[in-house]
Amino acid sequence: MQLLFIHSDYMEYEAKEKTRVAEPISESRKKERIEEVLVVFVAVEREDEKDARYVVEKASEETISIFNKVGAERIVLYPYAHLSSELASPEGSIEILRGMEEDLLSKGVEVKRAPFGWYKSFTLRCKGHPLSELSRKIQVREGVEAEKKSKALEAEEKAESHFFFMNEKGNLIKTADFEFEEKRENLKKFFVYESEKRREVDKIPPHVELMRRLEIADYEPSSDPGNLRFYPKGKLIKDLLEDYVKKSVAEYGAVEVETPIMYSTGHPSLKDYLERFPARQYSMAGKGGKPDLFLRFSACFGQFLMSKDMSMSYKNLPLKIFELASSFRKEKRGELVGLRRLRKFTMPDMHTFCKDMGEALKEFKRQYEQCMRVLDGIGFSTKDYEVAIRFTKEFYDDDANKEFIKELVRIAGKPVLIEMWDQRFFYFVLKFEFNFVDALEKASALSTVQIDVENAERYGIKYVDAKDEEKSPIILHCSPSGAIERCMYALLEKAYLEKEGGFLPMLPLWLSPTQLRMIPVAERHLEYIDEILPVLTGIRVDVDDREETVSKKIRDAGREWIPYVAVVGDKEVEKKTLSVTIREESSKSQSKGEQKQKAEEMDVFELKNRIEEIIRGKPFWELPFSHKLSERTRFVGG
RNA sequence: GCCUCGGUAGCUUAGCUUGGAUGAGCGGCUGAUUUGUAAUCAGCAGGUCGAGGGUUCAAAUCCCUCCCGGGGCUCCA
C-alpha cells in the first residue's frame, strides 16, 4: 500500500461521474468540504490482499501517528490509484479502505472516506510546514520470513507455561491458592513481576544515582547505549568480583579458557541461535559491506566449538570449562537500565559435560548449592533473592525427578516459584535462577543453571564411553553469580533498601574501595598516621589530609560509605590508639540527638586484625589512587 | 523498536503555563581559620539552557527532527 499524507487547511471534493468500478453511494456523500484535515491518498496494491487485516492495522497505525503529530482535526481517506502501478482488485481495495475507515472511527477520529471508483474534482490547501507532506509504504509481512522462524521459536510460541509455588515441605501449590506470609513479600513481588502485572514507577532506579555518585560507573553518551564506562572505584569493585568468581569456580574444579568474542554468521551450528534473536545481534560488516561476523552474546559457541575438537573419555566426566566472558546483546532501547540491563556485560559462563541425565542432575544440585555459596560470598543471603525452578512437564512426570525438585526447594529453605512448560521449546529441560528483587520491585536473575539436551548433538560434541562407543554428553550451562555488572547493581540496590530500612548503606567490606579512612584532627597529627600506615598493609587505607574541619571529613567519609573511620588527634597520639567509628554498627537518625555513632577506641593492631578477620579469603587489590585525599582526582562532580 | 515523561554550570535544581538581559545551593579555585565525630567564613571563576532547524522584532520558554536518559509495552539465548 502506498500512502501520501497532506496536512491541509481544507479539502473539497465532488464525485462527478462513475467509472466501471464505482461503489454505490448516497447523494449526500458526493460533495464534501472538510476543514483542518489530514488528507490521506491511498493506493491499495495487489499484495495487500494477501494479508488485508495486517495492512489495515498498520496503515491506521501510521495514519494515527501522523495525525497526532501534525495536530490535524479530522481525516479524509482518498482513494488514489496513481500512486502505484500494481493495484489491488477494486473489491479488495474497497474492503481495505472500509477497514481503515472503521479502524480509525473506532479510535475516536472523525473520518470521511471519499467514494471509490468515481471521477472526482478536488481542491486542497497544503499547510506547507515540514511535516505537511509525507509518504509511507505499508508492506505485507513476507511469507518467506514467517517460514524462516526456527523450530525452537515456533515451539516457544505454542508452548504454554503454568506457574506454581512449592513450599519447604515439597507441596506443589497453585498460585491462586498460595498464601504469602508476611516475610515472603519479595516472593510475591517476584511472582507479580513474572506474571507481568507491573505498576508504573516514575523514579530513576536508586542504583543508577548511586553508581554515579559513588564514582562507580556512568553512561557513555558517545558509545552505543548500554556500553558503560567504569571509574577507578567501579573498576576495582568489578575486578574484585571477577577475581572472586574466578577463584570459586576454579576451586569447584573448572578449567578456565578464553574464546573469541566474534563468530562467523555462516557457521551451520550457530544458525539456529542467530535466527532466534536476529534483532539482538551486533553485526560486523565483512566483505562487500555485508555483515558476516557477530559479537557473541554468551560464551556458549566458543566453548562448544572448542569442545567438539576435544577427545573426551567418560573417565574425564563431568568436565567443567569456565570463561569470564564479555558478552554483547543488542537489547532493545527501552530495555536498558543502568547496571541492571546492559548491551555489553561480563558473564561468568561455565559449561559442564556429563555422561548422562543421572550425572547431570547430580551436578545440577551441586552447582545449585555452589551458586548459593558464591552469592553468599558476594554478600547475598537467601533472604536477598527468590528462587525460580523451571522445567518441562515431561521432566516432572518422572517420580524420581519430582523428588529431585523437592530436594532443591528444601535446600533453599523457603517457598520457591515453579514454572512448568507443557513442552520443551528451547534447548533445556530444567533450569533454576536466583532472582534479586530491587527497590522498584523489578526482578533480575543472578545465578542460573540449565540442563541442555540439544547442543551436544548440534555441535557434534562427543565422548567415548566404557564400551568405546561415541555418545553425546548432556551439558549444564551455569553462571554462578550472573553478570558481574548485575551483581554490582544488586549490591547497590540492596544498600539502598537497607538505608530505607533505617540502616546505613554500605558495600561488603572486601568490596569497599576505601576500607579504612584516617582523619587527622590537625596537620600535626599526620606524622603519627604516617607512622602507623605501614602496619596496615593488606587493607585499603586512605587519609583525609585536606584542610577541612573534622565534621566535614566525617560527613564526607559517610557519604562514601566508608566502613571504618579512624579519627586521630592529640589524645590518640599520646595514648597510641585510634578512635574508630564502625559504620556497620552505627545508625543515622536525623531526629534530635538520636544519632548512634559507634566509636571504639582501639590500637592499630586490633583494628587491623578486626578488618582482616572479615575480609579473609576474599580477593584484595590495592587502592587504585593516592592514599592522600588532597592528591586525588575527582571523576564525577558532586 | 513503539508509547510516554524528561534534558538549564562538574552535581542538584529555579525559570517554561502567559516569549522580553539564565538565578541558587553543593562542588571547584583564592584568602582567612589548624579545627575532636555528619556541611567554618568570605570572595572569585564557571552556562552556544542536549544538538540542529522553524515561527517571531525577540526563544531556555512555542513548533519540528535527531541524540541521551526515566517509565510502560515487548524481551532477556
Image (tube, grey):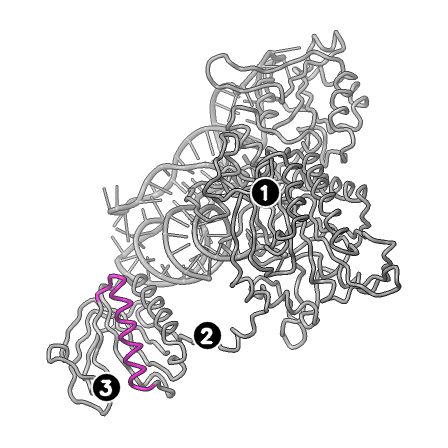
| Type of amino acid at the residue the image marks with label 2 | Arg
Res. A8 mark: none
Magenta segment: A89-110
Q: Which residue is mark 1?
A: A435
As displayed, is residue A82 above or below residue A421? Answer: below
Q: Residue furthest front?
A: A399
Q: Tell me: A556 left or right of A139.
A: right
Which chain is mark 2 on?
A
Q: Which residue is mark 2?
A: A141
CA gap, disc 1 and disc 3 = 61 Å
Which tag, 1 or 2, sits closer to the chain's start?
2
Q: Which is the main secondary structure of the residues drawn in magenta?
A: helix
Q: Tell me: A556 left or right of A45.
A: right
As displayed, is residue A459 above or below residue A29? Answer: above
Which chain is mark 3 on?
A
Q: Which residue is mark 3?
A: A117
